[in-house]
Image (cartoon, grey):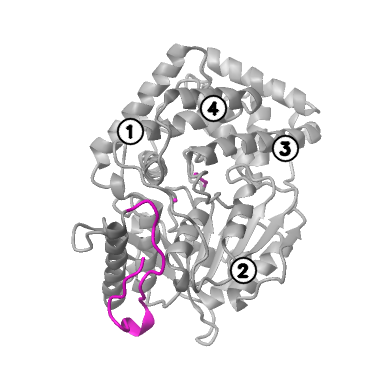
Amino acid sequence: MRDTRPKWRTTALGSAGAIVTATLIAGAVAAPTASASGESRGGQDREARGVALAAEKAAKTGIDWQDCPADWGLEKPIQCGYVTVPLDYAKPHGKQIKLAVDRIGSTGTKEERQGALIYNPGGPGASGLRFPRRVTTKAPLWVNTAKAYDFVGFDPRGVGKSAPISCIDPQEFVKAPKMDPVPDSEADKRAQRKLAREYAEGCYERSGEMLPHMTTPNSARDLDVIRAALGEKKLNFLGVSYGTYLGAVYGTLFPGHVRRMIVDSVVNPSREKIWYEANLDQDVAFEMRWKDWQDWVAKNDATYHLGDTRAEVQAKWLELRATAKESPIGGVVGPAELIGFFQGAPYYDSSWAPVASVFSKYVAGDTQALVDAAAPDLSDTAGNASSENGNAVYTAVECADAKWPTSWRKWDRDNTRLHQNYPFLTWSNAWMNLPCATWPVKQQTPLDVRTGKGLPGVLIVQAERDAATPYGGAVELHKRFKGSRLITEKDAGSHGVTNLVNPCINERVETYLLTGKLDGRDVTCAPHATPKP
């Protein structure tokens, strides 16, 4: 489930061995050291050779850094450029695509510099190009790290400025109100199934050439080519949400190319979970975190006047939902739009107060605040195109990474059962992922994520009550990556932990990036500060 609100977001879900020449570009390139699963042996070898060739070429070419285009919204001294990669690594001399990258140089002395730190915020489908702005905006948590590293962002294949894909006209995509995700009848289910099938067909019509190659292993190969283009012998990587799965796949394919890796809010990398089961697990975790938010709202009833118990807040929510179903608020906000807005609260603590405030205003008689917050802005054509593109990439990657159930009976049974106890998100999430049941291109078998030769200690950071990437994912990756360390933020549930103020976590993240040192054992940290009403 990705956060489908129009404003920009990060989510989850939001998935080889041939040496080319002896020494390549001062060690900037080496051959991959593990093989992807689910492909023929010949396919693995071809892709291994393909990525090594592409990396060798990128290391020679480098990146032609320029001032960023004015409409990218990236101020100087951030610079922008492109890295060329094969669309299909099995055909490295075939069609090429350009990936947009940006960077800001390290702020410290020459002696302090440790290389480039590459960032992926998740999705799949989110842009990483805003990462260098943590330096220009002097984000306090990153000041010391910025002395040691160039901060590098990129748009993964299919995203934003990197050969973007599309599945539907963006204005049509955001149009509201949409059908209530919770079906009242078999006819409702048939209508949603038709929409999902048409969406899959639209992806093929608009982006068919890209779809077979929109996989997490290919994005990991792209990451290795970017590493080489930067002139880096090894990768320093920070991945959040889906970016943790990208990191896990990269660490499996290229264990000897990793220098430092932090994964924050972890997608469960088990082959059994990617991606159908992972989405079902999300539904359960979202319900838990939705209740956490309701408890907080009830505790702050003096501010919000929505009830002083969870049950009272839930009753107000159900009343709002029923009203919007009967007659969409402002003509545009129905139950689907409400979920699009209200799901921000289970995702991020930073949304707790804003969501509660809008809800409170509505109950007090101000409907405009809710319309402004939850309805699409049809005049924001750039934002709508970005939202549509993000959803297209999310769908394309999750559908291509793994084989999804094709039996509607299975989808219906699983989601009907879950909805009984976890109604907040279950059906909404099901319809969002249902295009994968009729996906028009071949679906792969997920990589078997594991420790390979040369993989250093990876730092795993996870909130115990995360909704988008449930805690079990961090435990699973910790088991699979030997020598990794797990920091658990206890009794907390915000998605994306490394950018929140919590000294217990912040100091360890900084120490690891600056020195490579991990704690001798796993660490449990107290939660960051609860949001103020």
Give me the disc on residue 2. Answer: none
The residue depicted at 40 percent of the width and 17 percent of the height is 190
The residue at which mark 2 appears reads as: 483
Question: Quarter-wise, where is residue 234 in the image?
Answer: bottom left
The residue depicted at 75 percent of the width and 58 percent of the height is 525
In the image, residue 503 lies at what x, y percent?
72, 64
Three-letter amino acid code of the residue under disc 1: Ala
The residue at which mark 4 appears reads as: 414
Local secondary structure at mark 1: helix
Q: Residues within 10 Å of mark 4 (few under 14, many from 20)?
A: some
N-term mark: 4 or 1: 1
Give me the disc on residue 292. Answer: 3
Q: Nearer the viewer, mark 3 or mark 2?
A: 2
Q: Nearer the viewer, mark 1 or mark 3?
A: 1
In the image, residue 132 lies at what x, y percent?
48, 65
In the image, residue 278 lies at what x, y percent?
54, 41
Local secondary structure at mark 4: helix
| Mark 1 → mark 3, Cα distance in angstroms | 35 Å
N-term mark: 2 or 1: 1
